[in-house]
Image (spheres, rainbow, N blue to C red):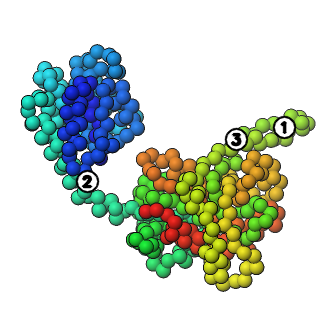
Amino acid sequence: MKILVVDDEGYKLRAVCKIIKNIEGINNDDIYPVLDLSKAKQLLRSNIFDFMIIDLNMPETIGDDPCESGGLNFIQEFLEDDYCFKPRHVIILSEYDKLLEEFKDKNIFNFQILHYNASSTYWSDYIKSKIQYEQYYTNSISHVFEENTYDVAIITAVEIESDAVKALSREWNKIENKMDPTIYYTTEFASNSKPIKIIAAQQSEMGMAAAATLTTKLLSQYKPKYIIMVGIAAGIADDNSYGDIIFPSDIWNYSSGKYVKNEKSENNELIDFIPDPKYIQLNPRLKEKSLQNFDEVLFKIKKKWNETILHDLKLLSGPMACGSSVVANEKVVKNLIKNHARKTVGLDMESYGVFYAANYSYGENTVPICIKSICDFADSSKNNNFQRYAAYTSAQFMKHFIENHLDF
């Protein structure tokens, strides 16, 4: 619960905060005391509050003289401001009867009006009971929201990746929504403490835009703690093999930049591309976990595959390049990717969209992860021969990592 207390009188601000702090279940971090309207407006633009308790005789900024109409004007402003989040409850608390009477005539939303009196407990009893009831209400409906939340959301771009994910569990339940064309599938993975709730979905098409859109939908509807992009990707380094699993330390968008004329060509007919790469890093704690020795796990994953694979299975860490089109030319890899991030280990078309949406979607704290395996090397020999194996290794390792290394 978040409670904003706006009052320039220190003694009154302390009294209100003391009452709230003594309510069971309320922590110091839940209370935001401010002394001026400017700070209150700033907080309302970046936080959603359950309560705002505000005085009417308020200064615009600290150091200004209090204005009798300051609180009233402030309330009217934030109600009309599209960039301010409206508190769930607003309580007017003032020691001036004249201001309270004036406000009554303009109280179009019938906000609760309380007269502050240090010798009376009416105002404090009301605030306490109102907050306690809100706690009861929130607790009574919390189980409804919990049923619609998941621990991990899994995103795939193509069917072969989705098939590998569905092979991880015998029981999948389908979710369809008339307002949403995407079909979702849910299951549970095992863990030592409790079952891990999983929801999975496939993009309607390949690419960053589709990935970002699906990520945003999953975050807003199902609020997962982690969202994982799993599947197949192109490898880059010469010493890597088909099926090797890439656990990127960061994702960068190599298709960000601008096209310019090549001044060295006749009539300036040739076009050059000047990249402006954007990077998003993996969560530092997960990066450390991904650098552990997984040789035993990788050996078991390879052994379970129903075909003979001659090379050992490896887990790779490093940057993953993401672009808006399929790459099947080694010159593109060398000139456009390796020149700008020489340690890049792979490339795909979706991961940056997932990371961007997870990091910049409103009000979410979902951690993005990418786990993709090499199915080709983005050159002229590109083919589909190892797509099934790559989809299998990435999905199997993802399941192991979810069940053994993620915190819930």
User: How far across and how far down the image is residue 349, in percent?
Assistant: 65, 56
Q: Is residue 284 above or below residue 386?
A: above
Q: Earlier in the sequence, mark 3 or mark 2?
A: 2
Residue shown at the point (75%, 46%) measured from the top left? 340
Look at label 1 and name its amino acid: Asn
Q: Earlier in the sequence, mark 2 or mark 1?
A: 2
Q: Earlier in the sequence, mark 3 or mark 1?
A: 1
Dot 2 surroundings within 10 Å: few (below 14), some, or many (20 or more)? few
Q: Is residue 324 above or below residue 161?
A: above
Dot 1 surroundings within 10 Å: few (below 14), some, or many (20 or more)? some
Q: Is residue 229 visible?
A: no
**Mark number for residue 138?**
2
Q: Quadrant of the C terminus?
A: bottom left
Residue shown at the point (25%, 57%) measured from the top left? 139
**Mark number for residue 276?**
3
Q: Is residue 272 visible?
A: yes
Query: In the rendered image, which residue does mark 1 sit on?
Result: 262
Look at label 3 and name its amino acid: Asp
Dot 3 surroundings within 10 Å: few (below 14), some, or many (20 or more)? few
